[in-house]
Image (cartoon, rainbow, N blue to C red):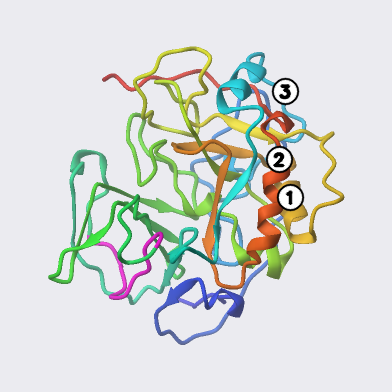
Amino acid sequence: MKVLQISLMLSLSIFVSACNGDSSSKPIASAPSESETPSQGSSESFKPYSYNDRAFPDDNIWNADISQAPVDPDSETYINSLGRNGTLHADFGTVWEGTKLGIPVNVVYGNQPKVPVVFTYAEHSDKGPYPIPPKALIQHGQNSTGDRHLSVVDVDNGLLYEIYRAFPDGKGGWRGDSGAIFDLKTNKQRPDNFTSADAAGLPIFPGLVRYDEVVVQGEIRHALRVTANRTRKAYVFPATHQASTLTSTSLPPMGARLRLKASFDISSYPHHVQIILKALKKYGMFIADNGVSWQITGDFNMDWDDQELSTLRSVPGSAFEVIKLPPLKYTPW
C-alpha cells in the first residue's frame, strides 16, 4: 500500500513514525450544496485518503457548502444563549503560559504497532487495539489535566483513532474515558446515542483548523469545530450524542451548525485569518462540545502566529447565524 505525502510544514505539530514509499495526492472537486434536510452522503462512498486533503468523501456533511442554506427560525435565540456580545477565539496556536495550544495530530502508517486501550465507557467506545506511537502527543501536553484528547491518523488505511482523557497505563497500553474509530474514506458515522472522544459523538480531527490547510494550502474546505457554554439535552445530525441535562428550547442542541454571515466584512483581517473566516462563511462550524462559547479548535503548531490569530477576538457572536436544524434527537437517559 503506498504511503501518502505529508507536508513538511507539519513537522512541528505532529509525531510521524518512520516510513518509506511513494507519494501522491489529487485535488477534490467542490462540495455539493446542502439541501434544507442535510444529506448523509452515500454510505458506499469511498475515496483514497491523503492527509493533505480534507477528511471523508465529497458528499459528506462536513464538506457541504452551506453558504446558501436557510437560517433556522430560532437562530437569534440560539445566538443569544451562546452570547451575541461574546467573540470568536482560537483554542489553538503555539504555547501560552507553558501550555501547548490546540490538539496535536499524531500521524502513523499501516505498520504502526497497535496497543491495548481500556475505556471507562467501554459500551460506547470502539475497543482497541489502537496504533498509538510510544511518544504520542496529547492535547495541552503530556502532563495536562484537562480533556487530554488524543488524535491518531493512520494515513495508509485512512483511519482516525481518537480518545478522550487519554493516559498511558505504564505498561505499553493506554486508558481513556471514551474512544472512537472513524473511516475517513467513507460516510459511516457513530450509531445514535453513542459518544466519541467528543461530547457530540463527532470526530475531532476533521473539524480542526490545520496549519497545513491555512498556511500551506491557503484554503479550508470543511466545517470547523466549536464549543458552547450551554447546550440542550438533544442533538441533531451529524451529532449522535448530547451531553446536557438542560431542556430549555433557547439552548442549541449538539450538532447545530453555525455560519458567519455573508455580510460580515473580513477585508481588514490578516490574510491567514481571512482564510478561516471564509471557511466559516462557506462551511460553518458544528457545536461539538460544552465549553467556552465561540472557541474554535485547531492543531498545535509552533509556526502559528498567535498575534495574528488573536484578531479573531474581534469577530462578535452577533456576526453568526444558525442554519436550519435537522430534526431533534434525544438520548434516552
SS of the residue under disc 3 = loop
Q: CA distance from mark 2 to mark 3?
A: 12 Å
Task: Name the residue located 75 percent from the left edge and 35 percent from the top edge.
Answer: 67
Query: Are the residues tagged 1 and 2 within 8 Å (C-beta)?
Result: yes
Left or right: residue 68 versus residue 88 is right
Q: CA distance from mark 1 to mark 3?
A: 20 Å
Quadrant of image for the N terminus: bottom left
The image shows residue 232, relative to residue 38, as above or below, that is above
Q: Which is in the foreground here, disc 1 or disc 3?
A: 3
Q: Badge 3: few (under 14), some or many (20 or more) residues near its Cα, within 10 Å?
A: some
Task: Name the residue located 26 percent from the left edge and 74 percent from the top edge.
Answer: 113
Stretch in magenta:
129-140
Q: Amino acid at mark 2?
A: Asp
Left or right: residue 295 versus residue 233 is right
The image shows residue 257, relative to residue 251, as above or below, that is below
Task: Name the residue located 39 percent from the left edge and 20 percent from the top edge.
Answer: 233
Left or right: residue 78 versus residue 203 is right
Pick the residue in front: 252 or 269.
269
SS of the residue under disc 1 = loop
Q: Badge 3 is on which residue?
A: 70
Q: Badge 2 is on which residue?
A: 65
Q: Badge 1 is on which residue?
A: 30
Query: Which quadrant would residue 76 be assigned to in this image?
Result: top right
Q: Amino acid at mark 1?
A: Ser
SS of the residue under disc 2 = loop
